[in-house]
Amino acid sequence: MARVHNFSAGPAALPASVLSKIAAELPDYRGCGMSVLEMSHRSATYQQIFDETEACLRRVLNIPDTYAVLFLQGGATLEFAAIPLNLMRTGRAGYVVSGHFSKKAWQEAAKYGDAVLLASSEGTGFDRIPDLAPVDARCREEQLDYVHICQNNTIFGTMYHELPDTGDIPLVADVSSCFLSFPLDVERYGLIYAGAQKNAGPAGVTVVIIRRDLLEDPALDICPSYLDYRTQDAKGSMLNTPNTFGIYTCGKVFAWIEQTGGLAAMERRNRAKADALYRALDESELFGGTAHPDSRSIANVTFRTPAPELDAAFVAGARARGIEGIGGHRLVGGMRASIYNAVTMDSVETLIDYMHEFEAQHAPSARSR
Ligand SMILES: *Cc1c(COP(=O)(O)O)cnc(C)c1O
């Protein structure tokens, strides 16, 4: 099996062993005479797959029983609407805008209530997480239904290294691109959500983890039934047909995480990969990291050369070497290496070797020689 070095931001690399397991089970799932793709979501066999998937996630992330776990559809983007539709009970919530997706979340929430902008780093091109002291201060002064953050900014390569102190106000976090990259203290949050396609499985599944007391009050009257967390919880995420194959695949990824040491081991490996890449960037005279050093992500490493033509040449040369998905997001250009759980150190070293090779040809000192 010839596999590329896949640095795609999402849908992204999955562990090879997970793909093999799925392939082996596909035509005839454990003697059922049919594949998971063909099975009723109401069957006992599928319910067992679903239950074990949720149980495994609860073990891996250490999710207390006081939290509900939902497996929904519509991506993180649909949660941008679902969150205010469920939780904006007094009609006023706070948003920290640290990148493209958190800005989208803020704009979406403004359709349903007063979405208060608590802090933004747009002024510096989203190169950092905004200063959180003013956010903490406003949480002490103001009545807000929740405070929303995007914990890892996939496009800009920044990540929160500490969380805002929102006091009694529930913290709501989009963790799409850092979900399962490291342990989370679930109890710090009122709600955590993630599109699976970055680190947890295939596109088409969104995991929502919500503190049960937030389900006690009803959603807004206009909330579509599908988006109503209380309804979805009562129906076991099966108000309608769920993404059966996607959830099954997530279950395989969760089991792989558990079998390879859990989230502490994932974090160690992810930090080692990120450290190696950032070291290469800091030592380079051609490539530079675009995120402020205090806000660097361990999941998405963004960088560029001084010239868009050189960036394009780097991306093209990478592809010729079996290094895929290294181009930056279309909004920002440059390069981005997404080094999610399934991306190996071997792939990162291959990328660094190629960076050295490219630099030897294109660095200012090489050219003046
Ligand atoms: C990818 C991503 C999204 C958008 O996810 P969809 O599943 O495409 O809706 C939102 N937030 C973050 C942090 C992301 O990385």
Image (cartoon, helix red, strand yellow):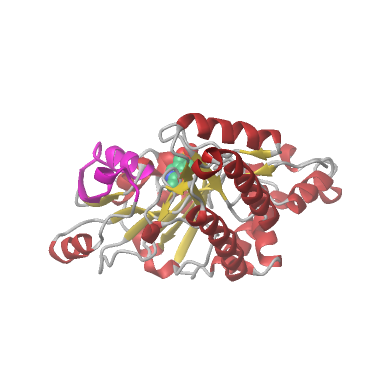
Q: Residue at x 45, y 64 (%)?
A: 67
- Please indicate, yes or no, whether residue 238 appears anywhere in the rendered image: no
212 sits left or right of 49 in the view = left
Residue 228 coordinates in the image, percent (x, y): 40, 46
Q: Which quadrant is the C terminus positioned in?
A: top right
The magenta segment is 101-127
Magenta segment: does it hold 120?
yes
Residue 18 coordinates in the image, percent (x, y): 74, 51
Q: Residue at x 64, y 34 (%)?
A: 317
Q: Which quadrant is the N terminus positioned in?
A: top right
Q: Is residue 194 above or below residue 260?
A: above
Q: Quadrant of residue 265?
A: bottom right
Magenta segment: does it hold 214?
no
Q: Is residue 171 above or below residue 230?
A: below
- Please indicate, yes or no, whether residue 135 appears anywhere in the rendered image: yes
Q: Quadrant of residue 112?
A: top left
Residue 278 coordinates in the image, percent (x, y): 51, 57
